[in-house]
Amino acid sequence: MMILVKGGTFQMGSPTGMADERPVHTVTVDDFYMDEHLVTQAEWKKIMGVNPAYFSSSPKKGESQIKRPVEHISQYDAFVYCNKRSIAEKLNPCYIIKGESDPKKWGAVPDEQNNVWDNAQCRWEANGYRLPTESEWEYAARGGVHDGQKKAAKDADENRSWNKNNSDCMTHAVCLKSPSVLGFYDLFGNVWEWCWDWYDCYTAGEFVNPRGAERTADNTDRMGRGGAWNAEASDCSPYFRNCGSPASRYNFIGMRVVRSKK
């Protein structure tokens, strides 16, 4: 189920966090829809025909295997999934690679970082599925409020996150922990969530619908947010920033989809 996140203005970052969580800066985001839970292995297999997950068997007793989050997917894989799912549901796909929106025309997904795929474009006006921007993700994680640190801190506790202290070194079926103040499950922990943006340091100022830095020779990592089953509990927060090559596939990185509200 997609949940409408009403847009607004908030203070992004943390004044007491890690160096790359500062400076706190003013960000405004438009309304958008975000899925209440991570993309599951069942949802991925329905669209892609395969289940790439490392944790593809032996779930925790009493949990559903097919409801565990998909992981071991690259950001490139996520682009393909988003467009294929959009096409399957008769929505306008968001991502353009090689001038095409049909993933069948993109060729094989690269296993190593690739300039063509790095230059993927996003049609923000399209009504299909896409990855959240880093600012959209943090806004939702903070509860969509101007100063959400207290509410967000409550959301990041172990009642709402699977982390290294309570995960038994594995992923868990979605929606088992309590939801966030906006109704989202597993925003913190279980698996990191790919975001659209290229990694860069924050700068002071006021920004409207920021979509991240440009890719440069020194700036080749994309953002991940939320923490994971093997992360420190303190990293499963609205502010902590992680990043990696968009071609990387690990058993602690998954995804959650959003849609623009038009």
Image (cartoon, rainbow, N blue to C red):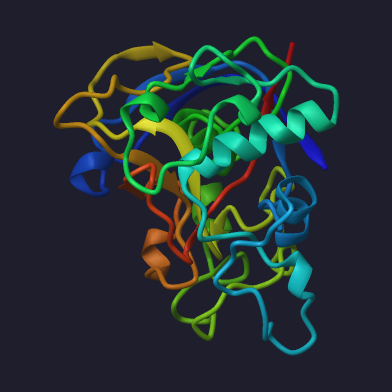
**Can you tell which quarter of the image residue 69 is in?**
bottom right
Of residues 126 and 172, which is closer to you in this image?
126
Image coordinates of residue 75 in percent, x first then y, are: 47, 42
State whether residue 202 is above or below residue 141.
above
Farthest left residue in view: 218
Of residues 59 and 118, which is closer to you in this image?
118
Residue found 80% across the figure and 51% down from its top: 46
Image coordinates of residue 200 in percent, x first then y, are: 25, 31
Q: Quadrant of the C terminus?
A: top right
Is residue 148 at all visible to an observer of this figure? no
Residue found 69% across the figure and 67% down from its top: 68
Image coordinates of residue 254 in percent, x first then y, are: 55, 54
State whether residue 27 is above or below residue 224.
above
Report whether 42 appears left or right of 149.
Answer: right
Is residue 28 at all visible to an observer of this figure? yes
Q: Quadrant of the N terminus?
A: top right
Of residues 168 and 251, which is closer to you in this image?
251
- Marks counted in the figure total 0
Of residues 109 and 218, which is closer to you in this image?
109
Report whether 41 appears left or right of 234.
Answer: right
Image coordinates of residue 87 in percent, x first then y, are: 78, 27
State whether residue 193 is above or below residue 10.
below
Residue found 16% across the figure and 28% down from its top: 217
Residue found 52% across the figure and 12% down from its top: 99
Farthest bottom residue in view: 61
